Amino acid sequence: MSDKYNGWTNYATWRINLEIFDDIDLSDFIDDKPYLADAALWCREYVEQHLEETGDGLVLSYALAFISDVNWHEIAQHLINDASYPSPDGDEE
């Protein structure tokens, strides 16, 4: 049996992508097309920052536990692929 959820690694990855990153163009936040690892780190820090701003105590603890299952690289790759970065020849991708 596969652990995939709606084509994503798991439920946590799908849900965070849907709820947090669905309408985000990465190029609005990161000027140059990032390396995958850098984009994944940015994604995780972006979510953690929002959680810390909106939650505390037990709620924050549960939210942080939930996002520990997220495949940040998968979300980052999706964001990079969908971003409006110029291609090397000067056209937007």
Image (tube, helix red, strand yellow):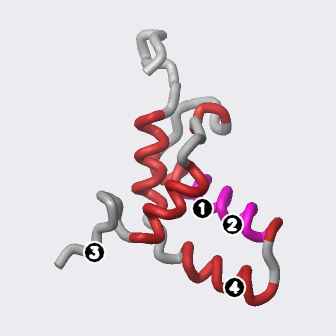
**Frontmost residue, 12 versus 27:** 12
Image point 64% across, 84% down: which residue? 62
Q: Which residue is mark 2?
A: 48
* Residue type highlighted by circle 4: Ser
Q: Position of residue 81 (x, y in %)?
A: 41, 36
Determine crowd level at label 3: few under 14, some 14-19, many 20+ residues with C-alpha closer than 10 A: few
* Residue type highlighted by circle 3: Asp
Sequence-first disc among 1 and 3: 3
Whether tag 4 and tag 3 are in contact, CB under 8 A, the answer is no
Determine crowd level at label 1: few under 14, some 14-19, many 20+ residues with C-alpha closer than 10 A: some
- Mark pair 1, 3: CA separation: 21 Å
Q: What is the span of residues highlighted in magenta in the rendered image? A: 41-52
| Outermost residue, top side | 90
Query: Nearer the viewer's eye, disc 2 or disc 3?
Result: 3
- Mark pair 4, 3: CA separation: 24 Å
Quadrant containing the N terminus is: bottom left
> Which mark, residue 44?
1
Whether tag 1 and tag 2 are in contact, CB under 8 A, the answer is yes
Sequence-first disc among 1 and 4: 1
- Mark pair 1, 2: CA separation: 6 Å
Image point 67% across, 56% down: which residue? 46
* Residue type highlighted by circle 1: Arg
Whether tag 2 and tag 3 are in contact, CB under 8 A, the answer is no
> Which mark, residue 17?
none
- Mark pair 2, 3: CA separation: 24 Å
Vertical placement of residue 82 versus 65, above or below: above
Sequence-first disc among 4 and 3: 3
- Mark pair 1, 4: CA separation: 15 Å
Q: Which residue is mark 4?
A: 61
